[in-house]
Image (spheres, rainbow, N blue to C red):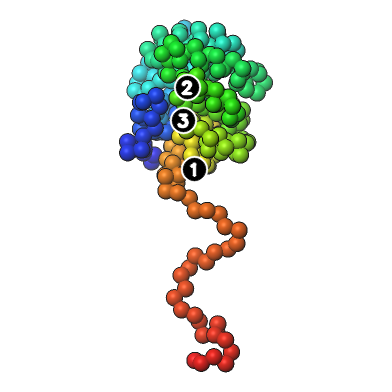
Amino acid sequence: MSTPETFHDPLVLYGTSFHSRLLLGTSRYPSPATLEAAVMRARPAMVTASLRRQGAASGQGFWQLLQRLNTPVLPNTAGCHTTQEAITTAQMAREVFHTDWIKLEVIGDDYTLQPDTLQLVSAAEHLIREGFKVLPYCTEDLVICQRLADVGCQAVMPWAAPIGTGRGPVNPHGLQLLRERLAIPMLVDAGLGLPSHACQVMEWGFDGVLLNTAVALATDPVQMAGAFADAVAAGRAARLAGTMQPETVAQPSTPVLGTPFWHQAEGSPS
């Protein structure tokens, strides 16, 4: 049974502490009941919600579900393709969800859903000036992440792989280099498919992960939500514990208390 991380090592974003380092998306679940059960099992720090994907009829039921979950909501600008479109959607989301938090997405390619890094920085800068707590979805590009930090983003969310692919970290070197070079909190968002993927990026020093498809499309989403929560906690614990350095040759792990008689040189005294 999954248990949330304790507050002795909280995730801190924009000065706010969260009990968990896992964030969950809310789309593509087989039913609202399954979504609710998965969130209750994982107990994430936040759940994401897209203003653009909620119709008038379904929106009311979804809003009631979010209220029952009693979990902070992170609205996102999913589906936006321009700076102005993302800004307008964020402003509407703040009014609807009554929060300054926003997951900023500006999509540049409809096939890969790759972020438009050229417009992302300007959108983030504008929203920061308006008082939003911006969590930008971006690639693992070091320069882009640095520019986002320069305009005031106190955290960034690089992808591991394109959204919904479940391939895990396709550029381990790039992600690890990014983690080494930037000191701000970083959450891996998109592309994780297995709990082991989440554990791995946490071991590399990332501060959290955001998931959706890997849980929603699992055979048992509720059990998978718990597995990811456990994996995130395990990866964080391993990072704090300090992992051993790899060796090029085998190293004995069993203590030697004495030298067996057959190892004594021939003719040596018994």
Q: Position of residue 44 (x, y in %)?
A: 40, 30
Q: Are marks 3 and 2 in contact (CB under 8 Å)?
A: yes
Say whether residue 227 is visible.
no
Report whether 76 appears left or right of 247. left
* Relative to 205, residue 117 above or below: above
Residue drawn where x is 49% and y is 65% of the image: 253
Residue receiving disc 1: 203
* Relative to 192, residue 46 above or below: above
Element under label 2? loop
Residue receiving disc 2: 153
Q: Position of residue 172 (x, y in %)?
A: 60, 39
- Mark positioned earlier in the residue sequence (3 or 2): 2
Residue 193 or residue 61, whichever sits in front? 193
What amino acid type is highlighted by mark number 3? Answer: Ile
Q: Locate residue 95: give its quadrant.
A: top left
Residue 18 or residue 214, whichever sits in front? 18
Q: Which residue occupies the extreme front position in the image? A: 150
Say whether residue 3 is visible.
yes
Circle 1 Cα neighbour tier, 10 Å, few/some/many (<14 / 14–19 / ≥20): many
